[in-house]
Amino acid sequence: MNYRSLAFRLGAWYTLLLSATFALVGTATFYGLQHYLRSNLRDSVSRRSAQVEQILIQAPADVTDSAIVREIDTRVAPEFNNRFVRVTREPATLIYRSGPPSDRSFDPSLVSAVTRTHSADTAPPATAIVGDQHLMIRTTPVNAVSGNYIVELGVSFGSIDEVLNRLLDLLALLLPVLIVCAAGGGYWLVTRALRPVDRLSQTAEQMSLQNLTLRLPVVPSGDALERLSISLNTMLGRLRDSVQTSRRFLADASHELRTPLTVIKGELQELAGESTVTQRDLRERVGSVLEEVARLEHLVSGLLVLSRLDAGESQRDWADVDLAELTFSTAEQMRLMADDRGIEIELSALRKALVRGDRARLKQIIVNLLDNAIRFTKRGGTVWLRTAADDMGVVLEVSDTGIGIPSASIPHVFDRFFRVDEARSREDGGAGLGLSIVKSICSVHCADIEVESRVEAGSCFRVTFPRTPHFRAASGRESLVDAPVPIDVPANAPEMTPKG
Ligand code: ADP
């Protein structure tokens, strides 16, 4: 027997509680019955005593003692009713004493006089001990025309004791049986109630990382057990998704890393195989290898950022960052790249917008979105940057007049290693991680990101940050945030449907 098991402990508590209840009910029954029987006996003694008192009161002044005796024998019949009656004329003349009762429960000659301390009306019957018997005796003074009397009327507790003893015997016999039944029943009930938990644990034992498709049986109990099995299943579902995502990510990352490595290996092998290499040839080969190394470096740093974001970054260095100022400085740094490609960057719609977060990571969002907008926009195109803050939140928008994204690809653009046109993107140095990094940074900052795009018309990426609590509290002050301004976007720019 496992004494520490839940079944044993629950069973033991159940038995203990039930035994205590039985004992309580038994005791209450015993004392309740005793009280009831005693008060019945008291009533009966009072009634009989009243009969005797009546006889004495109604007797004429010259009544004889034998007449009183006859009258009591006829009307009260104490022996037949197992009662004790004694009538004494004051000061100490014994007029009547009943004979031995028919059940022989006591000897009337041994009953000593009971001293009365209460008034006649309220006097409770006293208890006298006669041999091995207890007698309830009521003593009443009677002032009649024929004299002053003391009436003593009693009855043995024997009949009550007999009933109570029987009850005690019954309880003594029943209680252990009930306790044994309660213990057995309790243990059976508890093990039965815990059977679904056993099934849950058996199924859980069969699970492993390789076998996460199994589901725990849902116990339709409508209580915590059902909720537990449902939440565990939901958790398992999330675990399976996350394991699958990690596996896919690992496979994709290996694939992406292999391509430049294969190119580097090929270039170097060729170089090693050639007996004579011209200076120009060598420079070209090394240039090609360096290009692949740069691609690798870009890829690895992207992976590093993602893994750090996945691991959860600390918010210790977070500060209030003005997105408008950050967007402006970042765009100025990237303007050279845009100029090279003949693309204009338009910054007139930047409005002060405070966000709480990591400045470097927030800058990365702007860099990645702006880099994509420049890379996927044809020469002569325009890229607009907008920041704004209102009661709903803080918005950063990057829109362009670029090549756009086909609607079928839009749901996947934030997936890791996803590229609409793989060859073109790779040529541009894109590893398909830029937008997934943006998405991860947004999650860390509790921001939403959405995209609207039309092929050959352009794309618009919108990031919505929640308002920081202290910023929200201070938003009543005009100096902190400009009033919402209309977006300064030309008619040919792609439209964003307003949120909500
Ligand atoms: P990459 O680093 O390859 O650009 P991203 O994750 O940044 O990867 O983008 C994923 C894909 O989404 C890109 O390959 C490109 O096809 C598409 N994309 C992203 N931004 C734009 C944009 N502004 N215009 C058109 N296509 C875009």
Image (cartoon, rainbow, N blue to C red):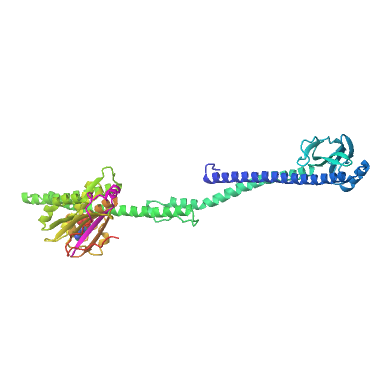
Any part of residue 58 in sight = yes
Where ligand 1 lies, by quadrant? Answer: bottom left
Residue 83 image position (x, y, % from top left) = 84, 43
Q: Quadrant of residue 45?
A: top right
The foreground one among 62 and 269 is 62
The foreground one among 318 and 453 is 318
Q: How many marks?
A: 0
Q: Locate the N terminus by quadrant.
A: top right
Is 246 on the left-hand or right-hand side of 275?
Answer: right
Is residue 464 inside the magenta stretch? yes
Q: As drawn, which residue projects farthest toward the left?
A: 279
Vertical placement of residue 122 versus 255, above or below: above
Look at the image and give the residue range highlighted in magenta.
457-483
Is residue 237 inside the magenta stretch? no
Q: Residue at x 57, y 51 (%)?
A: 189
Q: Locate the C terminus by quadrant.
A: bottom left
The foreground one among 208 and 363 is 363
Residue 373 image position (x, y, % from top left) = 18, 57
Q: Residue at x 24, y 64 (%)?
A: 407
Residue 220 image position (x, y, % from top left) = 49, 57
Any part of residue 300 in sight = no
Residue 58 image position (x, y, % from top left) = 87, 46
Q: Quadrant of residue 172?
A: top right
Is 162 on the left-hand or right-hand side of 175?
Answer: right
Q: Quadrant of residue 142?
A: top right
